[in-house]
């Protein structure tokens, strides 16, 4: 059990008569890069919210970093990192102020903040930009910085909600380099994306359709199973069957 | 006659401090589907706003449907359709009310141009009494397209119509565009998704306000200098590191399930030597094959200087 | 023209489909009138007053008996010193004090006139005015009775002193103030928010790119709020007549005409804000800080302008609501005609013209 980072068993979330997440069951192993793809409105965001301890499931069971999503949401929050395309850094704070703020939230000591902050800036090659306002950084840098900040407290799991939307192709790849590094250091990565080529970078991918997980395997096995040559086509075949049209 | 022309269009913000578009020059022929391909912040939206007469350029000149973008903005506004990047419909109005409203302000009726939007509209018609804010991403996109088409524009401007839309809706959307093109409408479309570029007649690659290349998607791919190889092994992340440190490697990027690799010098012994090298450092299930470079490869190639 | 009406219809859809907007447009005006007027004027029954009778003669006894008989007063008879009375006011024990001088009846019978002193707590101006007017009518009754019994006509002159708020700003004064406030709120704030919302949503781009003339967009956006404002005005006037018993003494047509002028100036202010504000939030904040607060504080319906520092007084002469307040008071409360308010009207028209002019100059056919 030690090497299971996330475990969901018939996890369900209903809003009135609408079942957003419909009895999904899956495991994510420690250090794995787990892709979570699905059409708009398939239930990805809802599922992710439950796993981050932000929303209570209606039924089913799930543990994240060994903690129960019903009873130990606060402990879950201490052990995860989160980054989304929409909200990441404060634009009116400098790079270092953002780092200090987020590291502070997770209770890092001043010395740790200084050490890890310096290391982070060095890794991204932006040491000279420490005092720059985030607003004046190029989008690609911001996304990389925001990911690095999300894992500064060395969480067990990091949740990434469409982290690379609109980013240029080179930066997207540099971003994935960071993801690989994080995974190598033992951090479990749970990522949603609209770019199907990025789904190929994941160790395993689950495809959500109408609140259910309709396929879950390694990218190469999925391609074999659907007898196609890309994840894009796998996704297309599955999502075409979707009945839901609402967000 | 060209439907759209741009001649050295420059656009800056913050009193010249931010250069958004840097001497952009291209033309779009009548009936052509032309793609502006580039990441966020490349200047795509600025070009759209200059062409749709919403912003004045700081320098250069341009025409849309033969009208000057500065002096004849009223004429241009009468004959173009525009779908901005942001979802631009009234969320609190129903599907039908939105469409009626846009038909009226363009001095037409739904019935008058129903033929043009029929294919698209029948897909959302079952939900015509639903508020636009309650539609899914793909549906919203279709409705926005209907609204932009309702007055039968000569030139259609679509700014990132497929951003944030799932793969199925994206495919459907591009099929609709193809049908519109056959009806003779000129389409200028922008997208950050490189895989959509192949669906355009011609594409301009744009980054940091500069147009890097203008050509058909086929020719753009052919412009890639040198040979490209796809490399695959069981441990992809280790492979990336190993290939990057391999002395003969010129560039190496992940592409889906493989690495796209170019050598410093193209020669026939390259593949054998690399195979041997990777085998020796413990890679298994190795696969190396020559491939045709794609648009994204070319984009990375020519935008590389920007990344040091 | 068809485009124009389609646009206005769309605007009304927005208004009627958003509960928050509806509440703003119709709930707030009603709440304000009730708050400022009705609630304040309704609780004047059994008010505690103290009567100090230093005369203790036939006339004073008779007047006191009448006061006691009134349902408005809860009379406490005592001989209090001036300081004691003041202390009783401070603790809120009493609302009014009536003092009969020692030679009340002899003055009345020999000089045919007498004085009584009335002191009211005017920190609650509505209560104070109402109580003193009740008292005056009781005294009037007494005088008429004296005449009817064939005696020589006497005059009793109540000498009224208002404590704490000598300006006597009360309910009748609040209604014109509320009218200025509500019209400003609906026209300026709601219009600027509605326009900025289109900018935020991205629909403004599509509208500008359409053949619809940009000035039509602006006019179409303002027309619904003009209509709603007039509706609100009617509602406020109806409420003040039927709920607050505040009759409209002057010409209703004149009142509506002046109001329309004020509404146009407010709409122009709202447009100015919308040109500069980038988000609904900032439009809201700007209207509140630069329009609502000055209207509340500087028009004179809450605090007398005469008592303000000169700088504030100067500012108060720049805001249209100041003149509107004066005009409404004159027409509605004093029943005056156009002849006595033409100066204010002219100034307000001038300010409106300037605002519209600035709007036309800063008017944009493009995004930036």
Image (cartoon, helix red, strand yellow):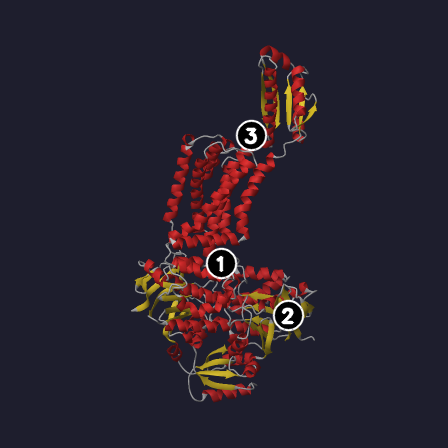
Label 2 lies in what chain? Answer: A
Residue B289's disc is none
In this rendered view, identify the residue nearer to me: A200 or B156. Answer: B156
What is the quadrant of residue C242 in the picture?
A: top right
Residue at point 55%, 59% (across, down): A97
Q: Chain of mark 1?
A: B
Q: Secondary structure at mark 2?
A: loop
Q: Residue at x 53, y 73 (%)?
A: A176
Residue A156: mark in rendering: 2
The residue labelled by disc 3 is: C168
**Which-is-in-front pick, marks 1 and 2?**
1
A159 on left or right of B126: right
Q: Nearer the viewer, mark 3 or mark 1?
A: 1
Spatial CA distance of label 1 from label 2 is 45 Å
> Can you see residue A56?
yes
The quadrant of the rendering that contains the C terminus of chain B is: bottom left
Q: Quadrant of residue A56?
A: bottom right
Q: Are marks 2 and 3 on the same chain?
A: no
Residue on which disc 1 sits? B93
Same chain shared by disc 1 and disc 2: no
**Picture coordinates of residue A218, whole percent (x, y):** 58, 80
């Amino acid at each position: 059990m030690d090497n299971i980072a996330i475990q969901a068993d018939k996890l369900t979330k209903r809003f009135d008569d609408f079942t957003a997440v419909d009895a999904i069951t899956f495991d994510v192993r420690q250090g794995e890069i787990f892709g979570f793809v699905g059409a708009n409105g398939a239930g990805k965001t809802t599922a992710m919210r439950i796993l981050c301890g932000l929303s209570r499931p209606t039924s089913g069971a799930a543990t994240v970093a060994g903690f129960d999503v019903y009873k130990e949401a606060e402990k879950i929050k201490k052990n995860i990192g989160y980054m989304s395309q929409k909200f990441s850094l404060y634009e009116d704070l400098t790079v270092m102020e953002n780092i200090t703020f987020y590291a502070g939230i997770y209770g890092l000591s001043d010395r740790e903040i200084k050490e890890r902050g310096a290391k982070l800036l060095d890794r991204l090659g932006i040491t000279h930009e420490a005092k720059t306002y985030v607003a004046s950084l190029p989008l690609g840098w911001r996304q990389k910085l925001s990911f690095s900040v999300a894992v500064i407290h060395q969480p067990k799991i990091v949740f990434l909600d469409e982290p690379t939307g609109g980013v240029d192709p080179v930066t997207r790849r540099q971003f994935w380099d960071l993801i690989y590094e994080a995974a190598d250091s033992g951090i479990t990565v749970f990522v949603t994306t609209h770019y199907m080529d990025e789904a190929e970078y994941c160790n395993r991918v689950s495809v959500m359709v109408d609140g259910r997980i309709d396929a879950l395997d390694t990218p190469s096995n999925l391609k074999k199973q659907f007898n196609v040559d890309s994840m894009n086509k796998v996704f297309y075949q599955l999502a075409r069957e979707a009945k839901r049209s609402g967000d | 006659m060209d439907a759209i022309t741009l001649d050295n269009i420059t656009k800056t913000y913050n009193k010249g401090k931010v250069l958004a578009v840097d001497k952009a020059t291209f033309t779009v022929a009548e009936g052509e589907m032309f793609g502006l391909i580039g990441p966020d912040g490349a200047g795509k939206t600025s070009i759209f706003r200059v062409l749709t007469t919403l912003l004045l350029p700081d320098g250069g000149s341009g025409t849309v449907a033969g009208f000057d973008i500065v002096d004849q903005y009223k004429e241009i506004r009468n004959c173009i359709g525009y779908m901005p990047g942001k979802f631009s419909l009234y969320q609190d109005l129903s599907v039908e009310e939105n469409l009626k409203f846009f038909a009226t302000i363009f001095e037409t009726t739904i019935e008058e141009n129903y033929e043009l939007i029929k294919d698209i509209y029948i897909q959302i018609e079952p939900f015509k009494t639903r508020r636009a804010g309650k539609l899914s991403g793909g549906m919203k996109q279709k409705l926005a397209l209907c609204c932009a088409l309702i007055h039968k524009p000569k030139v259609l401007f679509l700014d990132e119509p497929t951003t944030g839309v799932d793969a199925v809706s994206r495919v459907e959307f591009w099929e609709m565009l193809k049908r519109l093109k056959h009806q003779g409408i000129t389409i200028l479309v922008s997208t950050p998704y490189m895989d959509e570029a192949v669906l355009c007649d011609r594409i301009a690659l744009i980054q940091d306000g500069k147009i890097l290349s203008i050509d058909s998607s086929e020719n753009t791919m052919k412009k890639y200098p040198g040979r490209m190889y796809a490399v695959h092994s069981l441990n992809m992340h280790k492979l990336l590191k190993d290939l990057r440190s391999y002395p003969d490697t010129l560039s190496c990027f992940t592409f889906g399930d493989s690495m796209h690799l170019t050598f410093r010098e193209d020669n026939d012994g390259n593949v054998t030597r690399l195979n041997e090298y990777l085998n020796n450092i413990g890679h298994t299930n190795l696969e190396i094959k020559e491939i045709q470079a794609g648009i994204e490869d070319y984009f990375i190639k020519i935008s590389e200087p920007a990344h040091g | 023209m068809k485009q124009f009406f389609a646009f206005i219809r769309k605007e009304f859809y927005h208004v009627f489909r958003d509960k928050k907007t509806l509440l703003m447009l119709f709930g707030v005006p009603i709440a304000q009138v009730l708050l400022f007027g009705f609630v304040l004027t309704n609780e004047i029954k059994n008010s505690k007053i103290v009567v100090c009778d230093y005369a203790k003669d036939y006339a004073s006894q008779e007047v006191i008996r009448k006061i006691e008989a009134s349902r408005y007063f809860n009379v406490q008879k005592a001989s209090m010193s001036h300081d004691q009375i003041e202390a009783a006011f401070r603790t809120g024990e009493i609302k009014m004090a009536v003092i009969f001088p020692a030679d009340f009846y002899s003055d009345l019978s020999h000089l045919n006139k007498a004085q009584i002193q009335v002191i009211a707590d005017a920190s609650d101006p509505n209560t104070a005015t109402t109580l003193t007017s009740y008292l005056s009518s009781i005294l009037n009754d007494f005088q008429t009775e004296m005449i009817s019994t064939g005696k020589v006509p006497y005059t009793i002159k109540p000498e009224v002193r208002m404590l704490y708020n000598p300006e006597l700003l009360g309910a009748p004064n609040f209604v014109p103030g509320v009218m200025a406030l509500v019209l400003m709120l609906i026209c300026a704030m709601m219009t600027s928010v509605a326009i900025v919302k289109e900018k935020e949503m991205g629909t403004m781009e599509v509208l500008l790119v359409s053949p619809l003339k940009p000035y039509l967009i602006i006019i179409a956006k303002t027309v619904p709020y003009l209509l709603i404002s007039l509706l609100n005005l009617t509602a406020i006037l109806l409420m003040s007549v039927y709920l607050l018993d505040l009759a409209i003494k002057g010409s209703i047509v004149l009142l509506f005409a002046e109001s329309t002028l004020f509404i146009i100036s407010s709409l122009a202010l709202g447009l100015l804000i919308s040109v500069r504000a980038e988000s609904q939030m900032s439009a809201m904040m700007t209207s509140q800080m630069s329009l609502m607060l000055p209207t509340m504080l500087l028009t004179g319906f809450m605090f007398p302008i005469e008592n303000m520092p000169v700088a504030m007084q100067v500012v108060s002469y720049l805001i249209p609501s100041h003149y509107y307040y004066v005009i409404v008071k004159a027409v509605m409360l004093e029943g005056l005609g156009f002849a006595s308010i033409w100066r204010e009207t002219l100034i307000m028209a001038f300010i409106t013209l300037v605002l519209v002019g600035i709007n036309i100059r800063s008017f944009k056919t493009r995004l930036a």
